[in-house]
Amino acid sequence: MRAIGLLRHGGPDVLEVVGRPTPHAGPGEVRIRVRAAAVNPADTLIRAGVTPIRQRGNEPVIPGLDVAGIIDQIGPGTDTRLAIGDRVMAMVNPTRPAGGGYAEWVALPESWVVPAPLGASHAEASTLPMNGLTALHALDQLRLPQGSTLAVTGAAGAVGGYAVQLARVAGHRVLADASPRDADLVASLGADSVVDRGSGVADRFRALAPDGVDAVVDAAVIGAPLLSAVRRGGSLAYVRGGPDQAAFERAAATSGVTLTYAHVHDYDGRRDKLDLLRRLADEGRLSLRVADTFPPEHAAQTHRLLAAGGVRGRLVIEL
């Protein structure tokens, strides 16, 4: 089969189309003929070597955490409601021996795979698993009572956008940041108030919540400067550690703010969580946003575009 991988870490141009053995579904597994794989910042960290993945001999490292496609094989003895021909989506952990989702076929435990949202294209369905699960894990970790005030950074992005929508589903008041050109988009996702992103955003959140917000989902990886927006006893969920995580943790302790890490792989294999996202998308309460699609040969371009910033929705590789 064709896959997109790298034989050495580096810039986008290290990505190339490679040949890999076609996997088969073993006991407890299903195989997906992948039609779309979303491109995420996590993939660029794998490519650059910031997120280390042990290379197995001379085999290429295969990135990719999100896939959508069609079930074409069910492993022997697998008890599943899925059937051959079903349109599905899944999150893939690229640290597994078989690698990630930038490939024509992936075989996964059946609990990692759920039906695709009704009416969604493969490209659209591929944008939901990893980003949606990250936002859902952040909110689950925060354990906010209904009616809390939540601030979301990076609200125009995929994780931030899902955090806004999931917070609205949970009945929270949502404050969000955006550039002027994205303000209408973020408001359409359900934010009650939208402030300008950038330096001083914590002060702008505080102006809307003088006693401090109950919690923050920091999808933009701003870190310590956001602590002043949070009330004492509140919480901040971060999706990736910053360059000085120890200083961030000390500052949070001094501010009386609890930090929680939205670690998406805590939800590996959580069919219940991924299926919840699928149902919310079916109901129109989660938006599936595709920025553009590309063939495998243009995978390097997707990473360059992502690094340049300003992408709204996900870039998707169609296989």
Image (cartoon, rainbow, N blue to C red):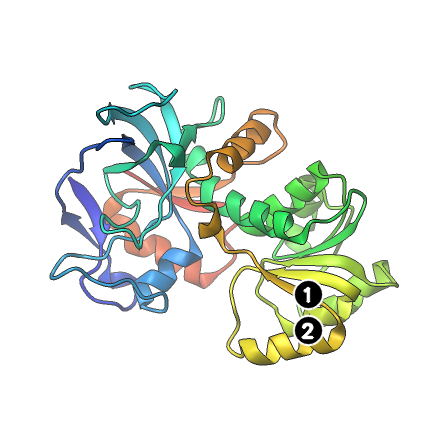
Of the pair 164 and 270, the residue shown nearer to us? 270
> How crowded is the residue under tag 1: few (<14 C-alpha within 10 Å), some, or many (20+)?
some
Up-down relation of residue 242 to residue 2 (above or below): below
* Quadrant (top left, top right, bottom left, bottom right) of the N terminus: top left
The mark total stands at 2
Q: For mark 2, give the secondary structure.
A: helix
Q: Confirm whether residue 81 shows in the render.
A: yes
Query: Taking 282 as reference, is 102 left or right?
Result: left
Of callouts 2 and 1, which one flags the residue occurring earlier in the amino acid sequence?
Answer: 2
Query: Taking 303 as reference, is 5 left or right?
Result: left
> Of the residues shown, which amino acid type is indicated by label 1?
Thr
Of the pair 232 and 243, the residue shown nearer to us? 232
Residue behind mark 1: 258
Residue 31 at x, y = what percent?
Answer: 26, 31
- Find residue 305 and name its label: none
Quarter-of-image position of residue 37: top left
Query: Taking 163 as reference, is 38 left or right?
Result: left
Q: CA distance from mark 2 to mark 1?
A: 7 Å
Q: Confirm whether residue 178 shows in the render.
A: no
> How crowded is the residue under tag 2: few (<14 C-alpha within 10 Å), some, or many (20+)?
many
> Of the residues shown, which amino acid type is indicated by label 2?
Ala
Q: Residue at x 69, y 51 (%)?
A: 183
Q: For mark 1, give the secondary structure.
A: strand
Q: Residue at x 71, y 44 (%)?
A: 187
Residue behind mark 2: 252
- The reply to whether the C-beta atoms of the residues labelled 2 and 1 are less than 8 Å apart is yes
Quarter-of-image position of residue 116: top left
Residue 159 at x, y = what percent?
Answer: 55, 50
